[in-house]
Image (cartoon, rainbow, N blue to C red):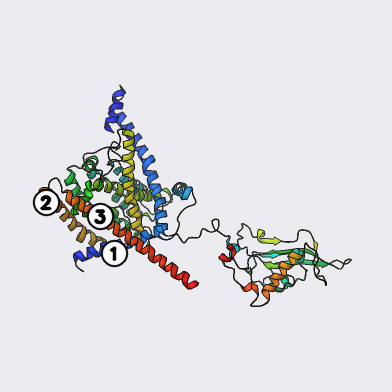
Amino acid sequence: MGYVGNIMSTMTTIFEGMAVTFSHFFRTPYTIQYPDRMPVRIQDTLPYRYRGFLEVDLEICTGCLACERACPIDCIYIEARKDKETKQMILERFDIDLAKCMYCGLCSEPCPTGSIHHTREFEGADFSLESMVRRYVKVPVPAYKPKKAGEDDPAIVPILERGMRYVNEFATADSPGSKVVTPEEVDA
Amino acid sequence: MQAFLDSIAAGMEGVPHWLVYAVGMIAFGAIVVFGFILPVAGVTSWVERRVWARIQSRIGPNRVGPGGFLQWLADGLKNLLKEDVIPDAVDQPLFRLAPYVVVAGFVGAFVALPFAGSLIIADLNIGILYVTAVTSLVVVGILMAGWSSNNKWSMLGGIRSATQIICYEIPVGLSIFPVVLLSGTLSMQGIIASQGWAPQQWHMFHSPFLFAAFLMFFVGALAEGNRTPFDLPEAESELVAGFATEYSGMRSLLFFLAEWGNLYVIGALVTTLFMGGWQVPAFTGNTLVLTAAQFGTFFLKAYLWVFVAMWIRATLPRVRIDQLMSLCWKYMVPIGLVNLLGTAVMMVLVPEGSDVVRWVMLALALFVLLKFGLRVRYHLRRANYGRMGLGAARA
C-alpha cells in the first residue's frame, strides 16, 4: 500500500469500526441487574430439587436421627429422648450449622417423611458464624409418629404431602424432580 | 469582561482600579471553575462510563441518583476523603506540585474560551495562540509527576507524554493556521464572528483543505490530551498507570479532572475554529435569551466532540509509539503544510471563498453521514439475524 492507500485504509477501517460500535447504542444491554431489578426472583427460576439451605419441618420430624448419622461433616446436631411415661420421642434440640454444611444432600435422602429438605434459597451472607446456625427447636416438642391408617390431621396433611413429594422426587432418575424448571415456565 | 469591571470601578470612588480587577477576576474565575469546569468534568466522567458501557453491551453506573447521574459526586467525595499517600522515595515538592500544574494548564485555557457572544472571561487578541501555549503547561506537570515519582513506569509515562504532546503541537498548530488565515485574527471571538450560523458558512466546509485541517486538529488534540487511541503515557497494560501510578486520593483525581476537563476544551476549540462557535440566527432582540441560545448551541456543539472522543476511546485500540510518531511526522505534518499552502493559494484565487465549494463540501459531509447511518443499520440487522437464527435452532 502506498501513502494515499494507507490514509484511505485508515479512514475506511475506522469508519467501519465506528459504525459497529455505534450500532450498540441501539441494542439492549445484556446486563442482568442482580438481585434487585430482576423480573423474577432468581430463586423462583431454580429447579425444585436445587440444593439450597436446609430446612426442617418439625411437625413431621420423626426424630429418627437418620440425617444426623448421614451427615459426613456433622453439621446437624439432634438431641432426642424417649419420654418414660408416654413412650414418645421428644425433640429437645435440632441445630443445623449452615456455615459447615456443604449441600451434599445426603441428609435429605434417608429422611422417611421428607422433613429435612433443601430449599431454593442460597443467599446467606452474614457478619458472624454463630448466626449461620439454624436452631429449629425453641421448646422441646414431641416427634411425629406415623399413623397406620394414614394422616388425618388437617394441619399436618399438607406438610406431609410436601415432604413426601420431596422424597418421591428423589426416588428415581426419571422422577419429576429431575425436571429443570425454566424461567418461561415460572412466568406461565 | 474588562468593560464590565471598568463600569464597576467607575462606580466605586476611592477604590484602586487594580483591586477591583483582582477581586473581579478571582470571583469570576471561581464561578467558572466551580460552576462550570468541575461539574462539566465530573458529569463527563459519568457520561463516559455510560457511553462505554452501552458500547460494550453493559449498563454502566446507574445506582446513584437518577440513572446514576450523581456518580461523579460520590466518586469525587470518596477521593477527597481518601488518604493522600506520598511514598518515601519521591521528590516531595515536585510530587506535590505536579497535579496542580496539570490542572492549572487546562483551567488556564478557559480564560480565552468563549461561552457565548458576550460571555468570555478575556477576549485576548492572541486567543488561540494563548490557548495552545497555556495547555502546553500540562506537559510540564506530567513530566514533573513522572520524574518525581521515582518510578520507572511513571518516568516512561511522563517522557512518552512529553514526546507526544510536543510532536503533536506541530500538526495541531498547522491545522489552526488555515483558520487564522481565513478569519485574519487570532482572537477567539473574531474567529467565530468570521463564520456564520449556517453549516455551509462554517470554516470546516470552506474547502477540502479546511476539512482535512479539521480532522487533523481533532486527531492531534486527542493526542495532546493523552486520549485513546493515543493514551500511551498511561497505557495500563504496559505502564500500570503511567505518570499517575504513585498518586492516590485527591491528587490522583486531579489528573483525571484535567483529562475529562481537557475533553471539553478540545470540543470547545473544534467548535470555535471549525464549527461556527456560538453563532445562532438573530431570532430575537432579547439579549438574555439570545445569550442563552448561544451558550446552549456552543455547549452542545462542544459536547458532540466530547462524545465522539468517548466513542473513539471505546472503539479504537491503542497505537504503538512508532505508529504514533509515523502518523505525526509522515502524515499529519506534510498534510498540514499542504493544507496551509492550499488555503493560501485558494485565498489568492478566490478571496471571498466559493459558495459552490462550500455547498459541495456540505453535501459530501451529509453523504458520509448518510452512508454511516446505513452501515449502522447493516450492523444492527446482522446482529438481529444472528439472534433470530439462534431462536430458530432452539425451537
The x, y position of residue A172, in whole percent, is 66, 77
Count how many numbered circles sit on residues in the image.
3
Task: Give residue A92's quadrant in the image.
Answer: bottom right
Residue at disc 2, secondary structure: helix
- Dot 3 or dot 2: first in sequence order is 2
Q: Is residue B2 left or right of residue B255?
A: left
Quadrant for the N terminus of chain B in the image: top left
Circle 2 sits on which residue? B345
Q: Residues within 10 Å of mark 1 (few under 14, many from 20)?
A: few
Q: Residues within 10 Å of mark 2 (few under 14, many from 20)?
A: few
Residue at disc 1, secondary structure: helix
Q: Is residue B154 visible?
A: no
The residue lying at 19 percent from left, 67 percent from top is A2
Is B271 in front, or is A84?
B271
The x, y position of residue B357, in whole percent, is 17, 52
* Outermost residue toward the right in this view: A85
Circle 1 sits on which residue? A13
Vertical position of residue B131 compared to residue B290: above or below: below
Closest to the camera, between mark 3 and mark 2, is 3
Q: Is residue B205 left or right of residue B99?
A: left
Q: Chain of mark 2?
A: B
Q: Marks 3 and 1, Cα distance to the nearest angstrom?
A: 18 Å
The residue lying at 46 percent from left, 70 percent from top is B390
Q: Are marks 3 and 2 on the same chain?
A: yes
Q: Is residue B236 visible?
A: yes
Circle 3 sits on which residue? B365
